[in-house]
Structures are given as C-alpha cells and as structure tokens.
C-alpha cells in the first residue's frame, strides 16, 4: 500500500489540475492572456535567438524577440546595420529579429500576375538565411561576416 501512495497522489493531483488548465481564460480572439494577437506583445518573450535551425528549437512556439533599434519602415540595409550592432553587443534575439525584418524587406518585390508563388531570385535573401542559420548554430562570427558582406555590396 505504501508503494502505491505516490502514484495515487499523482493521479489525484492531475485530476485536480486538469480542469483548472482547461478553464484558462481566453480573450475574444481565443488567445490566452498575455498573447494579444497583432500587438507584437505576445508571450513567451526572449532576448536570445532561437527556432532558426533544429538545434536551437526548444519549442513549437517561437518566442517574441526584441524589436530592432530602427523605425519599422526601415530598409533592408538599415535592418542589416541593426543586426550587426545587435550581434556586436551580444543581443542575439535582437539580431535575429533584425535579420528576419531585413529578409522581409528584400522579399518585397513586383512580380507578374501568376508568378507570385515563384521564389525570389535575390541572392541577398539566401545570404540572410545563411546568416540566420549561422546565428542558430551559435556561430556569431560567421553571421557577422555574412552581414558585413551584404553591407559592402
């Protein structure tokens, strides 16, 4: 009987906590508190880069990263400069966010009707992907080298 007590206690604890977890309050969008859709203020938050390569992915939910130190309408070059500055100061989360925003700006393009699904042929897009992957594997020096190469073009 003594050996069964820990198991029984675990079952009772689970039975008591499951209903509470199922009743987690949600807002009108269906998001949990702290996850206000479209505000850029969702949880979880992190100052470290993550979810860029399988080796640095710890959750299916990517954390909300810090905003780069540039205007949200900045050019891809301005975001690359912000990524470089963030890397130089060890702010990998801000660097990742800056790289992602630079990549997004490079993907903005005009295309012919019916060709919107064709991948971008901009080599800078692939180089930014390479920089993000270097960051994801912990190779900040390689990420910085790639960014430097993009900035000297």
Image: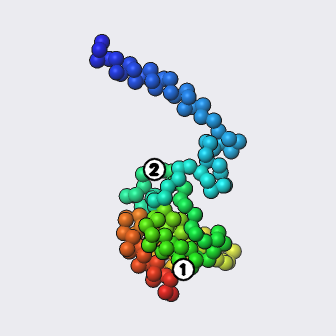
- Relative to 32, residue 92 above or below: below
The residue sitting at 45% across, 59% down in the picture is 48
In the picture, measured across the screen, residue 109 lies left or right of residue 151, that is right
Q: Secondary structure at mark 1?
A: loop
Give how far across and how far down residue 103 sits, in percent: 55, 72
- What mark, if any, has residue 122 been given in the picture? 1
Q: How is the image coloured?
A: rainbow
Give how far across and how far down residue 79 sits, in percent: 56, 74
Q: Secondary structure at mark 2?
A: loop
Chain-order first, disc 1 or disc 2: 2
Neighbour class for label 1 at 10 Å: few (<14), some, many (≥20)? Answer: few
- Relative to 1, residue 118 above or below: below
| Residue 51 seen by the camera | yes
Q: Which residue is mark 2?
A: 59
Q: Find the distance from the CA under tag 1 to the CA under tag 2.
A: 31 Å
| Residue 106 seen by the camera | no
Please name which of the two marks, 1 or 2, marks the residue nearer to the observer: 2
Quadrant position of the N terminus in the picture: top left
Query: Picture quarter containing residue 138?
Result: bottom left
Give how far across and how far down residue 134 sits, in percent: 40, 69
Q: Nearer the viewer, residue 77 or 88?
A: 88
The residue sitting at 37% across, 74% down in the picture is 141
- Relative to 52, residue 14 above or below: above
- What mark, if any, has residue 7 been given in the picture? none
Give how far across and how far down residue 98 sits, in percent: 54, 69
Which residue is the extreme one toward the bottom? 153
The residue sitting at 41% across, 79% down in the picture is 145
């Amino acid at each position: 009987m003594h050996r069964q007590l820990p198991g029984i206690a675990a079952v009772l604890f689970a039975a008591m906590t499951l209903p509470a977890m199922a009743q987690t309050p949600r807002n009108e969008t269906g998001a949990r508190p702290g996850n206000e859709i479209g505000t850029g203020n969702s949880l979880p938050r992190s100052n470290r880069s993550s979810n860029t390569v399988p080796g640095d992915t710890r959750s299916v939910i990517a954390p909300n990263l810090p905003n780069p130190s540039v205007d949200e309408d900045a050019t891809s070059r301005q975001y690359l400069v912000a990524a470089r500055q963030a890397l130089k100061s060890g702010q990998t989360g801000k660097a990742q966010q800056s790289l992602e925003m630079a990549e997004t700006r490079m993907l903005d393009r005009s295309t012919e009707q019916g060709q919107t699904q064709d991948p971008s042929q901009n080599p800078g897009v692939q180089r930014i992907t390479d920089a993000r992957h270097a960051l994801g594997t912990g190779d900040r020096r390689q990420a910085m080298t790639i960014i430097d190469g993009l900035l000297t073009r």
